[in-house]
Amino acid sequence: MPVNLFKIARSLAAVLALAVSAQMATAQPRHAIAMYGDPALPPDFVSLPQANPAAPKGGSVTFGEAGSFDSLNPFITKGSAPGSISTLTVETLMGRSYDEPFSLYGLLAESVDTDAARTYVEFTLREGARFSDGAPVSVDDVLWSFQTLGEQGNPRYAAAWKKIATSAQTGPRSVKFTFTEPDREMPLLLGLRPILEKAQWKGKDFTASSLDPVIGSGPYVVDQVEAGNFITYKRNPNWWGADLAFNKGLWNFDALKYIYFADPTVIVEALKAGDIDMYRESNAAKWATTYDFPAVQAGDVVKEDIPHKRPSGIDGLVFNTRKPIFADWRVRQALSLAFNFELINQTINGGANPRIQSYFDNSELSGDVAQPATPAVAALLEPYKDALLPGALEGYAQPVSDGSEANRANLRAANKLLEEAGWTIQDGALKDAQGQAFRFEILLANGESDTIAAVNIFIESLKKLGIAATIQTVDSAQYKERTTTYNFDMTHYTRSLSLSPGNEQTLYWGSEGVTKEGTRNWMGVASPAVDGLITTMVSSTRREDFVLAVQALDRVLTSGRYVIPFWYSNVSHMAHKSSLKHPDYIAAYGDWLGFMPDVWWQQN
């Protein structure tokens, strides 16, 4: 039977047309983008669900901050800058809704375009977007910001920059980034990159710490600065984005002030004295027993518990495994057994707070790390089985003591592990085969009163094992320098984690951070399983597969015994002046980014 070339050609053309049509259908510019599925809000949304679009404008609020600052550039490694600068004065192409795991809506960009595989992203800028000096936000500013941050900025920007194969202007207000490989999260990460004004930095060293304010396009501008003591912001009356739906009900105060205290324990006293307007209390026992000062009794200061649905994150004492004494997991387990959590929690919190069991505790991302891995999670761990530590597959639970000061059972188990690792008691001290004593320093920032109290109990317990540990407290500048260069044995480690972890996990515990300074991998994790599972996680195309990958990662990190976990709370304890109000509806992330001062206002 003869071949009908015309029919074949026509059929191929139809197939190609359908393919192109399908690609176009999945790659149309949109007002928003989600990590998985569709964003919750439609194109014509009026405001974010956690905002009050009718909130009154005006008034001011004063915050107390721990530590100090010596720079106004939060985008570089050098210096210590107020975190509020980025939030208040600089904008990104898209803004995050903290009522969803990970969804972005147009901010500087009016639309976002990507394909199903997410091999590229294209943003179209809003025509009226302006920097605070009146200059328009241009594609050139976007391109310059991405490259400068990626090559000269803080290491947290480098990983995403390395995944950009090409970047180019595609229209008067459009810019396209093509990736070296498909990456589901990359369009969202780039949507959250700060956009700076290129002209400000002409002839200047971007990497040099400076007290010159960064020019951004945000709702506020820096007003007054006294390095290390305070910084104030005033609302920009000409802010270009005031009428955007995304911003309705946000940024309601005319002025914001952040006062810095070298001793964090003084901040609550400043609230009592009326010098600041709000304070977050992390100690449950103090919250229950000491917040009855006159201003509370008079109703001038109110107490609120703000709930949240985010993961616990990790908060505790981190081992620097770059140090030989902490390289053996049995040693880390032994010290974890010596950490008498039940006694410490009762002493500091009245026993009110539950212990952090894993990095993603309090969420579906954790699963149950104390139980054997499910078949699906075990399958993800299978390629790394030979390198996994005990507990990753069969389950690992944090040690539990009887709550007594003696803690005998756990200390006996700790002694056995230390002996297996080559440490024995010699002349009344724990020493290795070469006679070197087991001693180390716990680095803490000034004013960490609860942590210092916990560590002092820990040190007394370690003495029973023949271990000599000491506390070294330093100011915030020294603390930043030493942790940036990993110059510590053990220190207090806190990492907040979201409902949609992604590429930032490489910065937190990717193996590159073992030697590269300035990452958040303070513990020095060097694990093929961690690196591989992060890759699996960020390449997942379905939320279900993503959750399984995070659960697997959580098991590897937890069983790695890199951190001796403290406690967490699923509410934020906030005391604030009664004139400060917020909407009744609380976003899923609760009192986190996007909450205070974002959605608050002053009611006179």
Image: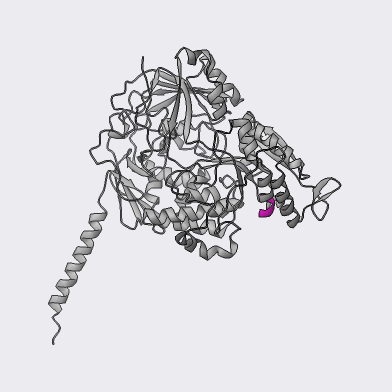
Residue 95 horizontal side relative to residue 281, left or right: left
Is residue 448 visible from the viewing direction of this image? no
The way the protein has been coloured in the rendering is one colour
- For residue 42, above or below residue 600: below
From the viewer's side, name the closer residue of 326 and 510. 326
Residue 464 horizontal side relative to residue 143, left or right: right
Residue 215 lies, in percent from the top left, at: 42, 32
Q: Which residues are magenta?
A: 327-332
Q: Is residue 529 magenta?
A: no
Is residue 379 visible from the viewing direction of this image? yes
Residue 242 lies, in percent from the top left, at: 31, 28
Residue sitting at x 58%, y 56%: 391
From the viewer's side, name the closer residue of 6 and 351. 351
**Which image quadrant: the C terminus?**
top left
What type of secondary structure mainly makes up the magenta span?
A: helix
Residue 517 lies, in percent from the top left, at: 60, 47
Residue 512 horizontal side relative to residue 582, left or right: right
From the viewer's side, name the closer residue of 468 and 506. 468
Residue 291 horizontal side relative to residue 43, left or right: right
- For residue 326, above or below residue 91: below
Residue 156 lies, in percent from the top left, at: 50, 45
Residue pushed farthest right? 427
Quarter holding residue 528: bottom right
Quarter holding residue 197: top left
Q: Is residue 328 magenta?
A: yes
Q: How many marks?
A: 0
**Which image quadrant: the N terminus?**
bottom left
Residue sitting at x 83%, y 52%: 435
